[in-house]
Each structure stands twice: as structure tokens, then as C-alpha cells.
Amino acid sequence: MAETAELRVGDKTYELPIIEGSEGERAIDISKLRADSGLITLDPGYGNTGSCESAITFIDGEKGILRYRGYPIEELAEHSSFLEVAHLLMAGNLPSASELEKFRESIRYHTMLHEDFKSVFSSLPKDAHPMAACSAAVGALATFYPDSLDPRDPREVEVSVHRLIAKMPTIASYAFKHSIGQPFMYPDNRLDYVENFLHLMFATPCEDFTVDPVVAKAIDLLLILHADHEQNCSTSTVRLVGSSNANLFAAISAGINALWGPRHGGANQEVIEMLKTIEGEGVSGREFVERAKDRDDTSRLSGFGHRVYKNFDPRAKIIKKACFDVLEKLGVNSKLLEIAVELEEIALKDDYFVQRNLYPNVDFYSGVIYTAIGTPDKMFTAMFALGRLPGWIAHWLEMHAQDQRIGRPRQVYQGELSRSYVPASSR
């Protein structure tokens, strides 16, 4: 007999099924609770609520484990490529050599944007945040490609998926180029995915540009590490919007806006701003750490701790090595990196941080890499969105395959009781 949980309310008892996941996670199924009892559960932030059953990503925050479709992040980071990981997340398995080449060719074919897209960006202020520009542009794709918007048509979905993955580097680079007044570059389909993105970002029509393979490898690695992270804020947003049967472009545009927040994807920008503040004030890492521990001081140690990982973030270890490789190859003597290393060494030995499980997270070193290759702070989150894109798409696809009901959270009303309208002249 299947195991159940019991909920007692007054003199009534309700039996609730217990579901067990493939990795042993256990959940109490309350999907029929309201229908059976008239009760709902209250869980602000959904920290204890499972919104779906998913086969895409597994996280064990206590042990520092992250797996995509069963593959450890460490193995994928060492051996795979971003497009291969994207295929894995969306299709469920690693592609064969011929499948991967076919996927790459399709992505290359769709890299260009419609010429009229230039006017979309040109209409924006020069200081527009790249995330606002990216969200607007992705939403606008639905107006340029009305032939592939039906989420129930497999062929239309496939075309939209490939178009979106192919055009996102072009969109992100256009947001950057517009902000600095440089001409937009056309994609060069002789290059691979990451090389093309770096070309779009940093090349100009007036001189040759060669992509450094060490930089390309580091960016490819960052995209892999950011590709998915279970039911986070932006992924949940994509699923919620998608549950209304909104087209893929609309759902992803909403996800970009969710990622924009400083409590989500904007965290790596906060790390760089913190490191620049320390450098500018001329204080030591130890002094800043002590300030961060002081409740009366507004200083905050960014890039440490994670809502899911309670010991260490497995992605942070991988990024740290890539960071040193990039700076060494570019010959950059980074004061920001020196400060970051000092902060990490202090925090890992300080009882205050150890007792609170405040270890470096994925954002701590990624911003240093972006800065080293000449990326402005405002573009960090747009590059995060580029990496997270296949994860968002994978969850959108999975949600539709499950025929998930439209998302409709409940609430506990705490407002005024019923009252009658009074005309303005009598108030």
C-alpha cells in the first residue's frame, strides 16, 4: 500500500499521498486538498512547495550536487560544449555526432536578425539597460515570426526553439553595440556559437578581430554552468507564463525580466560593484569583511551564500579556475581578482561565515571574467540570460509535454471586510 501522510483539522482527517522522486526526494501531494477539505496551504516564496515534477535538473544543496539530465556538472564542464548541453537539456539525452552537427547547422542558419530589428534597437535610449532591450527584442520576435507561435504544433515549436537559441547572441550583442554607439555586426557563421557571440560583441567593421580561444572556452564554460538550475525565479516565471499557452517568445521575454532582478541574475553585477568599491576606498579585504559582519554597517559581502546550496556551490569551483586561466592568458593583473581571492580566503576561515554556510557562489568569479574581457557591468545579466536560455526552453517544453494546468496560485485574504461604496461628496 502506498505511503500517505495524515492531516488532522478539527475532528476530520485527510490522507495525502506521498510521492518519491528518482533521487529519493519525498513530497506530500496536496493537489486535491482544497477540493477535499476547502483548505489551502500558505508558503510565501514557495520554498517548501513543488510546482511540478521534472526530469531536467537535480540539485542536492546539502552535498553540493548539480546534474543536468543525470550528468554531473563537473563532467559536462570538462568535456561538453554549450550547444551540446543545450541539446541535452531540451531533448533529454546527449546527441549523437550526427545529431549534434545537424543541430549546430540549424543554429548557424538562423543567427541573423531581420533588418528591421535595427530600428527596434535604434528607438531605445542609449542608456537603456541591456536586459530591457533583450526582453523587448525577444518579445518582438513573435511579430517577425507569426508562422511559428503555436505551442501545440511540434514543427512550429522546433523552429521557434532554434530561432531563439540562434538569435539570442545577436540580440544581446545589438543591445551592447547600441549602448556604446557602435555599428551592429552581422553574424559570421564560420565561427562556432561562442566565438560568433564574442565577434558580435567586440568586432568592428574597420579592423580584424580574432577570438582568443581561452576566452571563448571560458565563456562557453560559463554558459554551461548557467544553463539550468531547477525551479528558480525566472524558470518558474517561464513555466507560469507558458502555462497560459502563450508562445515561446512571450514566455522567454518574461523570464528575462525575472532574471534581471538583483536578487536573481543581477547578483554577479553586484559582486563587481562591491569589488570596485573596496578598490576605490582603499580598504583591505579584512576591513570590508568586518564591516559586512557589523549589523550597523550597510556593507554587504556579495557573491557568498545560496538559497539552495548549504555547503558549497559546485559551479564556483569550476569558474574560479577558468577565471585564473583567462587573466593569465590575457596578461591582466587584476586588482579586482586579488581582492576577490582575499575575500574568499578570509570568509572561508571566518567562523561568522562558516557557521552560516556562506561559501562563494557562481556569481563570485564570473563577473571578474566578464570584466577582464571588456564587458560592461550592465551586460553581465544579459550574458547570464544567454546561458540560461536552453534551461528555460527545456522547462517550457516539459511543461507542455505534461499538459500542465494553467498556473493559478491561491492566497489568504487579509483585507477589509465587505463595505458599501460612498460617493466622493460624502467622504
Image (tube, rainbow, N blue to C red):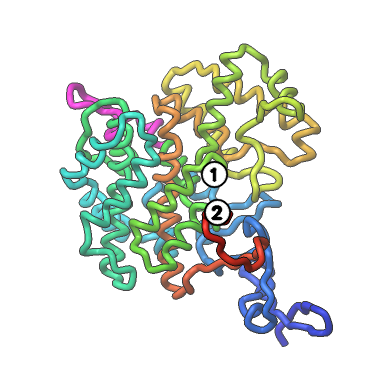
Q: CA distance from mark 2 to mark 1?
A: 9 Å
Residue type at numbered disc 2 = Asn
Residue 36: % across, % down: 67, 84
* Side of 262 relative to 255 (left or right): right
In the image, 368 versus 92, the foreground residue is: 368
Q: Which residues make up the magenta segment? A: 199-217
Query: In the drawing, does residue 174 fall left or right of residue 393?
Result: left
Q: Position of residue 120 (x, y in %)?
A: 24, 42
| Location of the N terminus (image quadrant) | bottom right
Residue 93 seen from this side: no
**Looking at the picture, which amino acid does disc 1 mark?**
His
Question: Residue 361, position in %: x, y?
Answer: 61, 39
Q: Residue at x 58, y 25 (%)?
A: 274
Q: In the image, is residue 214 part of the stretch drawn in magenta?
A: yes
Q: Circle 2 is placed at which residue position?
A: 232
Q: Which mark is residue 97?
A: none
- Give the farthest residue toward the right: 11
State the residue position of label 1.
Answer: 264
Report the residue that reaches farthest toward the left: 115
- Kindly indicate whether the residue at mark 1 contacts the one at mark 2 (C-beta within 8 angstroms): yes
Residue 71 position within the rendered picture, expressed as x and y whole percent measured from the top left: 52, 57
Q: Nearer the viewer, residue 196 or 143?
A: 143
Q: Is residue 349 above or below residue 258?
A: above
Q: Residue at x 56, y 61 (%)?
A: 422
Above or below: residue 102 compared with residue 40:
above
Q: Quadrant of the C terminus?
A: bottom right
* Label whose residue precedes the other's in the sequence (2 or 1): 2
Q: Is residue 205 visible?
A: yes
- Asked where in the image residue 305 lies, by quadrant, the reply is top right
SS for tag 2?
A: loop
